[in-house]
Image: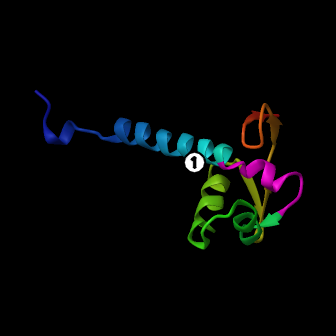
Amino acid sequence: MTTPADLNPSHLLQIGMGFWASKALLTAVELDVFSAIGAESITGAELATRLGLHSRAVPDFPDALVALRALDRDGDDAGFRDFEVIKLAGPSSAAVAYK
C-alpha cells in the first residue's frame, strides 16, 4: 500500500511544465515572434509594439522564451539564439528549426 510519504508529484509536475514550455513556444510561433524580431536585436517594448501586445506581456513573455532558450537576451534586447524561422505559407505560418 502506498503511504503519503511514498507519494512523489515530480512526474506530474514534469508533465505540466512540459505543457507550459510547448505552449509558450507555440504561442510565439502563432504570434510570429521570430519573424517580428528577424535577424536584429530589439527591446521587449519594440517587440510589443510590432506584435500589438499589451504592455503587461512584456517582459514576462520574452523572459519565458529566454528561459526556454528560444531567444537570447543581451541587456534589455531580445534576439535570436540558434533558431531560424522558415516561412511556410501566409504571414503568420512559420516553422521553427533548430540549427
In the displayed structure, would residue 72 be above or below residue 3? below
Q: Is residue 82 left or right of residue 62?
A: right
Tag 1 residue: 24
Quarter assignment of residue 86: top right
State the extent of the magenta-drawn residues as a range. Answer: 31-41
| Residue at 21% across, 36% down | 6
Question: Between 45 and 92, which is closer to the camera in this rendering?
Answer: 92
Q: Is residue 8 visible?
A: yes
In the displayed structure, would residue 23 be above or below residue 63? above
Question: Between 96 and 16, which is closer to the camera in this rendering?
Answer: 96
| Residue at 85% across, 52% down | 38
Q: Is residue 66 left or right of residue 75?
A: left
Q: Is residue 80 visible?
A: no
| Residue at 15% across, 41% down | 4
Residue 61: x and y, percent?
60, 59
Q: Residue furthest right?
A: 39
Q: Residues within 10 Å of mark 1 (few under 14, many from 20)?
A: some
| Residue at 76% across, 49% down | 34
Q: What amino acid is found at the position of numbered circle 1 in the picture?
A: Ala
Quarter assignment of residue 98: top right
Question: Between 31 and 10, which is closer to the camera in this rendering?
Answer: 31
Name the quadrant of the C terminus: top right
**Magenta span includes 82:** no
Residue 39: x and y, percent?
89, 52
Q: Residue furthest top?
A: 1
**Magenta span includes 38:** yes
Q: Residue furthest left?
A: 1
Name the quadrant of the N terminus: top left
Q: How many marks?
A: 1
Q: Secondary structure at mark 1?
A: helix
